[in-house]
Image (cartoon, grey):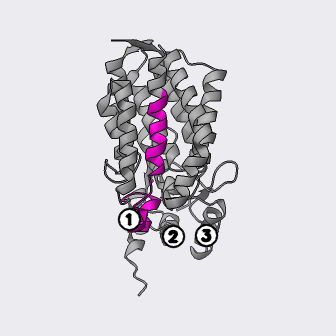
Amino acid sequence: MAFRDAEFFRRWLTAAAGSFDAEADRLTELDSAIGDADHGSNMRRGMLAVAAALEKEPPGTPGAVLLLSGRTLVSTVGGASGPLYGTLLRRAGKALGDAERVDDAAVAEALTAGVDAVSQLAGAVAGDKTMLDALRPAVEALPDYAAAREAAARGAEATVALRARKGRASYLGERSVGHMDPGAASSTLLFHALARAAADE
Amino acid sequence: MSDLALVGIVLVSHSGDVAESVAALARGLAGGGELAPVAAAGGTTDGRLGTSPELIAEAARRVDRGAGVAVLADLGSAVLTVQMMLAEGDELPTPTRLVDAPLVEGAVAALVTASAGADLEAVSAAAAEAYTFRKT
């Protein structure tokens, strides 16, 4: 099993920032169908701030990379995705502790703890048409990063048929059916970037 | 009663204008005498609609007199951000409590109760009770 250092996590989140930058308009389009049309721009701003923070003062451990990234997201996003993604990364970072290198089983365990915390904070589970529909199957497929990417994409695709039970989209009731959840779509970007970072090693 | 520490109140809204206005409304309706400290934490640091943990932490520090802080929030990211700060961080004074209450009615009830010298438990209960005032 491979070991991952701080550089791996920096490459992951910097690549993810690039994806959020490129996909911001698509995410906002999804969010204008059932949300308040700010998800793409909020996440682009937040993830670009993460990439800038990681470049300015590269943290020395995987845990510190995730903690700094989570903190940065929370203070720059402004929407609900700030505390949600911030919780995911910070809780995962705490789980990794001070280790300089972590194995893939530890990564899987840490990200699962992060997703558990998101689920608790949001009061949502898979099936509610939220980011959990992509996050939960993705962490269940870890430590196989390619499988996690596929599971996230399938989970996001499956939200099209679901009726929203949480967040702003839930006000729409039946009218939320037929649109992909923007949070689930953005969660796939995170796992896409993770799979790419792993494939590059 | 002025030597007794009063509970502080923080009002969190997606909108800076809403948070400030609800604070002004609550002060206006709470009547004369010494009022408990109330601070608004609305919008983002760059003036957009949204929620800022920095503004919330700063408002909480400003109203903290040592008797606790009651936070009322509107919806969505405002609620989630406060919940996250309570679960994760050490940026809020101890004790700080997110009160399950309607923002406008709850703010008035909280400020009246806090200004009378009630503790955090009673202030929270008064704000939460605002849910039960039916309008039809």
Please tell me which of labels 1 and 2 falls first in the chain. Answer: 2
Residue B135 at x, y = what percent? 43, 84
Magenta-colored stretch includes residue A188: yes
Q: Nearer the viewer, residue B12 or A38?
A: A38
Identify the residue at horizontal 58%, vertical 70% (top origin): B26
**Residue type marked 3:** Arg
Chain ID for label 3?
A: B
Asked which secondary structure carries label 1, the reply is: helix
Residue tagged 1: B125
Please tell me which of labels 3 and 2 falls first in the chain. Answer: 3
**Residue type marked 2:** Val
Question: In the rendered image, is residue B57 in sight?
Answer: no
Residue A116 at x, y = what percent? 33, 39
| Residue range of the region highlighted in magenta in the rendering | A165-193
The correct choice, above or below, for B14 with respect to A90 in the image is below
Q: Is residue B133 left or right of residue A75?
A: left
Residue tagged 2: B112
Res B57 quadrant in image: top right
Res B12 quadrant in image: bottom right
Identify the residue at horizontal 57%, vertical 51% (top origin): A28
Q: Is residue A108 left or right of residue B52?
A: left
**Residue type marked 1:** Ala
Gap between marks 3 and 2 measured at Cα: 9 Å
Residue A62 at x, y = what percent? 47, 19
Q: Nearer the viewer, residue B135 or A154?
A: A154
The correct choice, above or below, for A6 with respect to B55 in the image is above
